[in-house]
Image: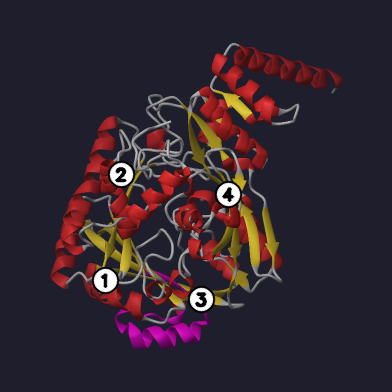
Amino acid sequence: MAISKLLLVFFSLVFFNLSFSWAASDPTYQSLLQCLNEIIPSPNVSAVIVSNNNPSFASILESRIHNARFNRTSTLKPAIIITPSDESHVSAAVICSQKVGFQLKIRSGGHDYEALSYTSDKPFFLLDMYNLRDVSIDIPDESAWVQTGATLGELYYHIWEKSNVHGFPAGVCPTVGVGGHIGGAGYGTMIRKYGLTTDYVIDAKIVNVNGKILDRKAMGEDLFWAIRGAGGANFGVVTAYKIKLVKVPEKVTVFRVERFLDDNGTEVAFKWQTVGATTDPNLFTRMLLQPNTKDKQTTVKVTVMGLYLGDINGLLTLLNKDFPELRLNKENCTEMPWIDSVLWWANFDLGTPPNVLLDRNNKDTKFVKRKSDYVQTPIPKDGLESLWQKMVQNEKVGLTCNSYGGKMDEIDTKESAFPHRKGNLYKIQYSINWDDPSNEADIKYTTQAKAVHEFMTQFVSKNPRRAYLNYRDIDIGSAKTWSYEEGKVYGESYFAENFDRLVDVKTAVDPNNFFRNEQSIPPRSTKTA
């Protein structure tokens, strides 16, 4: 036992010395470390920076990559990963990155479909918010402070620890980071009852380009408006949000119904388009359209799943009246506490304990492509029939359709930076996943996604064709010089009539465009830090 301990100490010292010697030979690392030491009064500053020749660099980088397309040997990696554990570290990182002359990219959970938060074609530092993950729940005030490196799962778990009649209207994937989710607006299964995730932000802390830490009062209402829906990383580094919790019943009901085309599938899909957006706001439904094999033939499966903020009997009464084509029955439904519905939507088995929501590990990363659309007029039945044919031809592309209406029709498009509210029946996410790492597979499957998306042009929003920021899609456009004209191409798709106001906010708070990515908000000047 004593020998084993001595060996462990020996190898630990060897590892430390190797890491130290590698770092010592890196002038960029040394410049950054010197700058951080001048700002942060701590003897352990080196613990928060990891150079790309550090043995732990790859594991830190890859642990929060959720799209294997951006984890190739050819992908440009950050020169250094900065892993702050305190707001003062973030402030210093912003100041020192500018001083050293490196771009700074900001990552929370890593569910970034185009990896704009952790890749670049220019040398850069990565500010990984993973360790800033405190969640402080105040049930009497029905509020919480949550740091942006926390995951949605951690947030849900800590709410559940304190109350079984409170929840938060955010996404269904528990490993999504709070920072990106809320900053890009965020939505979940209570969108029709309560609206967007970002609608429940009542304060925030942001580190601006000068390294100052600002709350809502100090940042001003224009910037506070912008970081709720346009992505906080356009304007600074959001370190925490104060959110308002919402009430949930002690029991809610979830359900799932599947129909193939030869079993009324087209009728169900057609009717869902209007029912989903007009039924009781306590009901959220999601329709999945997926190519599927039945009797050795490729067809389309129509799945309707939902969350009802009430009991089974109330749900059955509602849908038997509003949506008899679905043929919902008691066997399709399960009553449960709200926290168990969170687990159900995340595809955990019934009875799974809520502590699984604390698991932040990245599992089974696939190659993926996502695109998005908004539908404002129901697709006619003959249009759906033609869509089925297109999906059969492009057999891996699925459509996830999320119902709007309810609260989304009540909030003005200019209330926050996110504009896609009233007038939309539902939002579509086009999804395709694959396992083959070859470039040929990448071309094949991204081409399939583009083909289905292009086909849908006739049925979706126009002038501009709208898209959802949190479903990043580089096909819409990208910045090379960060001119207003470049930014307008993708900016109007994501932000519609709010784009110009966002440009004004950007110009006011970050005129030299230090905080940027390939689809960021440009300042009116093209000067880049």
Query: Going 73% across and 28% down the picture, which residue do you hit?
Result: 44
Whether residue 353 is visible to the viewer of this picture, yes or no, is no
Residue type at the position of mark 4 = Thr
Mark 1 residue element: helix
Q: Is residue 262 above or below residue 299?
A: below
Mark 4 surroundings within 10 Å by alpha-carbon count, few (fewer than 14), some (14 through 19), many (20 or more): many
Label whose residue precedes the other's in the sequence (3 or 1):
3
Question: Which label belongs to residue 442?
Answer: none
Residue 453 locus on image (x, y percent) = 22, 53
User: Given the image, on which type of amino acid does mark 3 rest?
Assistant: Thr
> Which residue in the structure is indicated by mark 3?
253
- Distance in Å between CA atoms under marks 3 and 1: 22 Å
Give how far apart the Cα atoms at labels 4 and 3 are.
30 Å
| Dot 1 or dot 2, earlier in sequence | 1
Contact check, label 4 and label 1, Cβ < 8 Å: no
Q: Which residues are magenta?
A: 304-330
Rendered location of residue 23, percent (x, y)? 61, 16
Kind of residue at disc 1: Ala
Q: Are marks 4 and 3 in contact (CB under 8 Å)?
A: no
Q: Which is more N-terminal, label 2 or label 4?
A: 4
What residue does disc 1 label?
Answer: 269
Separation of marks 4 and 2 at Cα, in angstroms: 26 Å
Residue located at (40% from left, 26% from top): 122
* Quadrant containing the C terminus in the rendered view: top left
What residue is shown with label 4? 148
Which badge, 4 or 3, comes first in the chain's sequence? 4
